[in-house]
Image: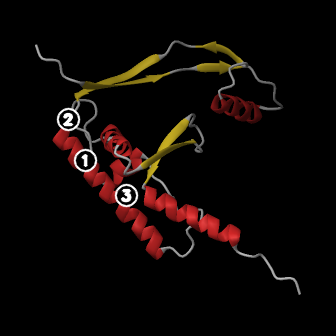
């Protein structure tokens, strides 16, 4: 029997109990959420057994399909970045994002999963596989940042092209070199 490579996605839920001192219930919840996000295990007084939510297995696609996906993901990134660079007057506007996640790419390319239990879900593993391939080819840069949304913990991987990163870096350097004022 020939060996094939598979991707196995295991989704689970874990329950932690924290002991915190606070003036009221809302403050206690806020304190516990902050400790959970920062990974502070000192206040954990109990952990329930992890509960398996789902297991999804699929064969890793052939190299040709992975190559096509990488090409499509790269084209999306470059087109998006060119629009930002050409149309946005203020690249440092906080509403403009300089990098995207695999989830963003999967949503914009309308990549959906097929199969029992996952039909129609956003195909984030497909986008991550394509973006990671582009990183390996050094056509895309990957970096991580701490998750910012309420109820999220850990880091998220973000992607952009080296050209876009260089453009943003040069803008920062240009601003640092400009004189602030002239003495009279």
**Residue 113 image position (x, y, % from top left):** 26, 39
Residue under the point 64% across and 32% down? 37
Q: Quadrant of residue 116?
A: top left
Q: Residue at x 42, y 64 (%)?
A: 81
The C terminus lies in which quarter of the figure? Answer: bottom right
Q: Is residue 32 above or below residue 158?
A: above
- Whole-number angstrom distance, CA of label 3 to CA of label 2: 22 Å
Residue in view at x 69 percent, y 34 percent: 34
**Residue 19: percent from the left, percent from the top?**
74, 19
Q: Which residue is mark 2?
A: 61
Vertically, is 51 above or below 66? above
Quarter of the image containing the N terminus?
A: top left
Q: Secondary structure at mark 2?
A: loop
Residue in the foreground of this view, choosing between 20 and 157: 157
Q: Secondary structure at mark 1?
A: helix
Sequence-wise first label, 3 or 2: 2
Q: Quadrant of residue 108?
A: bottom left
How crowded is the residue under tag 3: few (<14 C-alpha within 10 Å), some, or many (20+)? many
Say which residue label 1 marks.
Answer: 69
**Label 2 environment density (alpha carbons within 10 Å; few <14, some 14–19, many ≥20):** few
Cβ atoms under marks 2 and 1 closer than 8 Å = yes
- The Cα atoms of the two marked residues, 2 and 1, are separated by 10 Å
Camera-nearest residue between 45 and 136:
136
Q: Taking 168 as reference, is 46 left or right?
A: right
């Amino acid at each position: 029997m020939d060996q094939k490579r598979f991707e196995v996605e295991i989704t689970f839920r874990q329950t932690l109990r924290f002991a915190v001192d606070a003036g009221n219930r809302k403050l206690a919840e806020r304190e516990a959420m902050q400790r959970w996000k920062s990974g502070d295990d000192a206040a954990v007084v109990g952990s329930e057994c992890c509960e398996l939510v789902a297991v999804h297995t699929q064969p890793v696609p052939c190299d040709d399909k992975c190559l096509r996906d990488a090409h499509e993901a790269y084209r999306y990134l470059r087109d998006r970045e060119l629009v930002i660079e050409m149309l946005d007057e203020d690249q440092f506007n906080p509403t403009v994002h300089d990098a995207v996640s695999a989830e963003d790419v999967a949503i914009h390319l309308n990549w959906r999963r097929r199969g029992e239990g996952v039909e129609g879900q956003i195909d984030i593993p497909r986008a991550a596989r394509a973006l990671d391939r582009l990183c390996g080819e050094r056509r895309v840069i990957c970096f991580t940042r701490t998750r910012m949304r309420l109820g999220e913990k850990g880091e998220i991987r973000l992607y952009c092209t080296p050209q876009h990163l260089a453009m943003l870096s040069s803008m920062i350097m240009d601003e640092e070199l400009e004189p602030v004022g002239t003495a009279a």
